[in-house]
Amino acid sequence: SSLSRTTFNSGGGGKTGRVPVGIGRRRLRIVVTGGAGFVGSHLVDKLIGRGDEVIVIDNFFTGRKENLVHLFSNPRFELIRHDVVEPILLEVDQIYHLACPASPVHYKYNPVKTIKTNVMGTLNMLGLAKRVGARFLLTSTSEVYGDPLEHPQKETYWGNVNPIGERSCYDEGKRTAETLAMDYHRGAGVEVRIARIFNTYGPRMCLDDGRVVSNFVAQTIRKHPMTVYGDGKQTRSFQYVSDLVEGLVALMENDHVGPFNLGNPGEFTMLELAEVVKEVIDPSATIEFRPNTADDPHKRKPDISKAKELLNWEPKISLREGLPRMVSDFRNRILNEDEGKGL
Ligand code: NAD
Ligand code: UDP
Ligand code: UDP
């Protein structure tokens, strides 16, 4: 299988003492950068759950130890506080490279740091992959399509990105990261995989990261109005986090470099999203309008035929099914926050 081929030290597992975890499959040692974040922590749960060893590298910029605390006593789990902008030496079979703030509020906070994370961080992880012969998966983004002139977006579309705008540190940073991955693939033979992730939501998102789903859900639980930016007619396609995790693992374990769009093609305007939140969380919820941010893409929807055909993957959880699954996690954290403030 593709797994045994990538096992560090040619499947021996001898040097690291790794043992088989099932018929025909050895335990892998896997790095997840950004593993303390929203998507990363769910991915780590999946990899630990199937019997592999996981090393998380995270600088805790937007990630939290709480997302991983349930794994601290597991001998197959290791957490390293480290910034991927600095080099690191490890011996591993696979690298899932997620480290990078994903919410516009966070990535605009220190744009130069966002670029350094995308460029130097990705370079370091590719250098590591090259040195140890590990397979490398990049979590790129639908933002590489910018404000798209093609709808829905296929992987063949080159995008419409402003190189000098407020979002450029992220969009262009990820575009450069994709370039680096392809250059290490072509030039150094590194096995790379590129995922272009569309808007994803679920438990463990930062409460106040400014993304629309986390904002609307937290606002509704706090009995505040949902803040709709602009006229609310811009669209996004929202994917539940477990679908994304399945897609990332399927991509890592298949033989195709990509890029692959990983997203849920269900497309909603922000006003429609607010309606769904109202319907599934609190029928008394209200909305209020706010000015929109600069360079906000007008529409976004993945064409996922390539991932369906080559990875045999497609999302299973609709927005109406997924939203209720993040409510208890949000409620608990909002409650704890209020208690912390003595409310
Ligand atoms: P997140 O902010 O929750 O997680 C990012 C993690 O990376 C955090 O734990 C953060 O502390 C860590 N990190 C940031 N800079 C770092 C650095 N220099 N060194 C080490 N660690 C660092 O975001 P997320 O939603 O989990 O996103 C994970 C990845 O998926 C990101 O690369 C993001 O660009 C990509 N992505 C996410 C979405 C989405 O909707 N969630 C969409 C497209 C792409
Ligand atoms: N690197 C790393 N860990 C490794 C191997 C490399 O962090 O195990 C870093 C290395 O410091 C360099 C980057 O990855 O900054 C690119 O490495 P590569 O060997 O491709 O290029 P070079 O070091 O020759 O510039
Ligand atoms: N948005 C909104 N209200 C909010 C936060 C965001 O209407 O409280 C809008 C935002 O203008 C954008 C869409 O929701 O059109 C998605 O924004 P988000 O930051 O979640 O993700 P991205 O822009 O990166 O897709």
Image (cartoon, helix red, strand yellow):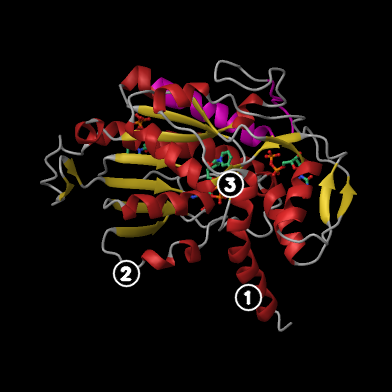
Label 1 SS: helix
- Taking the spot 81% from the left edge, 40% from the top edge, the residue there is 293
- Taking the spot 58% from the left edge, 37% from the top edge, the residue there is 115
Whether label 3 touches label 2, CB < 8 Å = no
Looking at the picture, which amino acid does disc 1 mark?
A: Asn
Q: Indicate which disc, 1 or 3, sits on the residue closer to the N terminus.
A: 3
Q: Which residues are magenta?
A: 160-183
Q: Which residue is mark 3?
A: 101
Label 3 SS: loop
Above or below, 248 against 32 in this view is: above
Crowd band around label 3 with a 10 angstrom C-alpha radius: few (<14), some (14–19), many (20+): many
Where, quadrant-wise, is the N terminus in this rendering? top left
Distance from disc 3 to disc 2, alpha carbons, whole Å, reads 27 Å
Q: Which residue is mark 2?
A: 73
**Residue 211 visible here:** no
Q: Which mark is residue 336?
A: 1
- State whether label 2 is within 8 Å of ligand 1: no
Distance from disc 1 to disc 2, alpha carbons, whole Å, reads 24 Å
- Taking the spot 75% from the left edge, 54% from the top edge, the residue there is 279
Nearer-the-camera pick, 123 or 231: 231
- Taking the spot 23% from the left edge, 34% from the top edge, the residue there is 6
Magenta span contains residue 245: no
| Predominant SS of the magenta segment | helix
Distance from disc 1 to disc 3, alpha carbons, whole Å, reads 24 Å
| Disc nearest the viewer among 3 and 2 | 2
Crowd band around label 1 with a 10 angstrom C-alpha radius: few (<14), some (14–19), many (20+): few
Residue 121: give x, y in percent of width and height: 47, 40
Residue 18 falls left or right of residue 96: left
- State whether label 3 is within 8 Å of ligand 1: yes
Looking at the picture, which amino acid does disc 3 mark?
A: Pro
Label 2 SS: loop
Residue 167: give x, y in percent of width and height: 70, 35
